[in-house]
Amino acid sequence: MGQDSAILRHFRHDAIRLLRPVWPLVSVATALGAVGGLATAAALTKINEAFYGEGALADGVLLAFAGFAALSVLGTFAASFGNSYAGGRIQAALSRDLTDKILTAPIERIERLGKHKLLASLQGDVTTIFTAIAFLSPMVVAGGTLVGCAAYMIFLSPALSAATAVVLILESLGANALRRNMLRSFEEVRKNREATQKHYLTLTEAAKELRIGRERRLHLRDVALSACIEQGRHLMTRIAVILQSLSMLSQSTNFLLFAGLIAYKVLAGISGAELSGFVLVLLYIQAPIGQLIHFVPMIGQAQVAYRRIAEFSEEGAEAEAGLLAAVPSEAGRRIREITLRGVSHGFPAAGDKAPFTLGPLDLTIRAGEILFIVGENGSGKTTLIKLLLGLYPPQAGEILLDGIPVMAGTRDAYRQHFSAIFFDYHLFDELIPADGAGPEAARPLLERLDLAHKVGISEGRFSTTDLSTGQRKRLALVQAVLEGRPVLVLDEWAAEQDPTFRRRFYEELLPDLRSGGRTLIVISHDDRYFDAADRVLHLAEGRIVEITERAMAEPA
């Protein structure tokens, strides 16, 4: 109940915010759609009058019919165009909102969700909501038509209209039960699509591993994907059956109404004009009713899609403030030291994973030093650098920059002192060098890293990123150096380099970067090159067990 009320609160807030820029257009389009629907019903009255009126055709009937028909067509077009335009604006706003939520959500939350769920929302949920919004204009027209037809039926025969209303209310009760069942199915479809998206990502990202591993390849195809595809087929079949049941219910209701008309004519008597009017209206409203039935699954899908987006917003209520503001960079500012005082960060048990806590740690990193962080897998090295980078906030203790504590409001400014190449890094092709440097500043670095013969600079971008794994890591280093920030964090950067370039990295590149004013924090397993560091920090089970130090060279 609490989650539903939170989602309802989000819906009210989002509806007001998203409709505020386009509400005049939506209001006019909706009104024109309703007028178009009413005009359609009015045109039906003129058709019935022309067919069954006594004597000569009354003056103005054809002109009135033409006017109502034109108003119906123009109203329908205006409603469709207006709501489609407004729907596009709302879709763009939702896409931007979801992008902003992902950009400002805590990194731990992004990691916990996984990119398959985020892609499902970015690619599917927003489009689903837009489709439902775009279909609102036909619904408004259909609603106006049904209201107008109902008024005409009451005019023809209040008794028959009352009986028809009772039958339609009973039909709506049955249809509502079917719709609730269908909504539950849409919830399952959404979860199924997330799981399928995850396996599709595996198909593309693990293409090489799947090609050489028959058992894993066949397991993915015949077990994991097959189960998702089969479940999806079952769910879509169930939804199709529900839709057909809705259609059959509507059709059966119509036959029941026609049977009632025949019985009423026999028992109570009714004029031909009244009977023909009822029949004409009942036949015509099949199309609007069919549109409403078609709209039911769209509304269900949109509800599920919005619920997923709203849940992300609710869980991401702790989103970091100020990340999207354009603030002048202070990347070139020198620092003296970074201090960790009693810092710790823990992860609860999840599934078969035991809980893990890093810290409490006390550490001071001095400007201009080369610090190696070493330890066995799972010792906490990556968690430590995420704390140092401000990606994870300390759960206890504090981080200080030049003696000033890093608080929530200053954490993003603190991050701007760092460039990082993670083990699972992303290689951008756009060059965004530090202030005062142009893209051409990359050329000497490309030469130094033996990439100039393969990579050029064109319109502020690398000409290609289609390189070997080691070369891509070097290209990422070009990006990081060009950012001009005082602290460079490298997570097992040399792991994919050949022996010659690995030696150059430790014996030439690191000292040169330090001479240029950089502080370097390096995760490494290359114990033969540990003497390249000023200090080597050894981690084990989330604790600092040893720090070995040698005499530190003076920074340039």
Image (cartoon, rainbow, N blue to C red):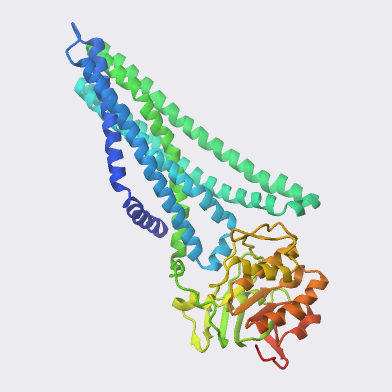
In the image, is 30 to the left or to the right of 202? left
Of residues 349 and 151, the one drawn nearer to the viewer in this rendering: 151
Of residues 448 and 101, the one drawn nearer to the viewer in this rendering: 448
For the image, the number of numbered tags is 0
Residue drawn at x 60%, y 38% is: 233
**Residue 505 point in image, percent of width and height:** 75, 76
Residue drawn at x 55%, y 38% is: 236
**Residue 204 point in image, percent of width and height:** 68, 51
Q: Residue furthest bottom?
A: 551
In the image, is 38 to the left or to the right of 207? left
**Residue 208 point in image, percent of width and height:** 76, 53
Q: Splitting the image into 4 quarters, where does residue 495 fall? A: bottom right
Of residues 316 and 328, the one drawn nearer to the viewer in this rendering: 328
Where's the C terminus, which quadrant? bottom right
Q: Splitting the image into 4 quarters, where does residue 50 fall? A: top left
State whether residue 271 is above or below residue 135: above
Q: Residue furthest top?
A: 55
**Residue 322 point in image, percent of width and height:** 43, 70
Quick check: can you spot residue 171? yes
Quick check: can you spot residue 180? no
State whether residue 387 is above or below residue 28: below
Where's the N terminus, which quadrant? bottom left
Residue drawn at x 56%, y 53% is: 119
